[in-house]
Image: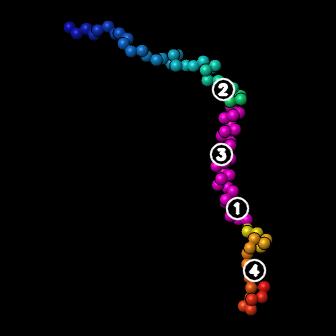
Amino acid sequence: AFAPSPATKTRSTMTAANMVATESEFYIDQNRRNLMNLILVGSAAVTVGGLAVPYALFFVPPGAGDGTGSTPAKDALGNE
């Protein structure tokens, strides 16, 4: 009759125990964490600042005539 062949390991199988890494392999020291946090906060600040500054400046009124070459308003007779 039919008899199955004995099981042979032809390919390597990874078990959970083989994939677990030790703590020393993935440990990030405090200096590197601080640097990563500074990069994150700095990039967020540049992005938010780049959007917030023009938005805020929209609500600041332009300055009064300060001698920059503007022409004062005159009446119908040409008087200031």
- Residue 48, given in percent of the width and then of the height, sits at 66, 50
Span shown in magenta: 33-60
Q: Are marks 3 and 4 in contact (CB under 8 Å)?
A: no
Q: Earlier in the sequence, mark 3 or mark 4?
A: 3
Q: CA distance from mark 3 to mark 1?
A: 20 Å
Outermost residue, bottom side: 77
Q: Secondary structure at mark 1?
A: helix
Q: Mark 3 sits on what residue?
A: 44
Snapshot quadrant of residue 1: top left
Snapshot quadrant of residue 9: top left
Q: Earlier in the sequence, mark 3 or mark 2?
A: 2
Residue ID at (69%, 38%) = 38
Please rate how many residues cluster around mark 1, counting C-alpha atoms within 10 Å: few if below 14, some from 14 to 19, many from 20.
few
Task: Give above or below for 8 relative to 44.
Answer: above
Q: Mark 1 sits on what residue?
A: 57
Outermost residue, front side: 69
Q: Amino acid at mark 3?
A: Ala
Q: CA distance from mark 2 to mark 4?
A: 65 Å
Q: Quadrant of the C terminus?
A: bottom right
Q: Is residue 64 visible?
A: no
Task: Give above or below for 57 relative to 69.
Answer: above
- Which disc is residue 72 wearing? 4
Q: Mark 2 sits on what residue?
A: 28
Q: CA distance from mark 3 to mark 4?
A: 44 Å
Please, what is the dominant secondary structure of the magenta stretch?
helix
Foreground of the two, 44 or 21: 44
Q: CA distance from mark 3 to mark 2?
A: 22 Å
Q: CA distance from mark 1 to mark 4?
A: 25 Å
Foreground of the two, 2 or 54: 54
Q: Secondary structure at mark 4?
A: loop
Residue ID at (69%, 26%) = 29
Snapshot quadrant of residue 68: bottom right
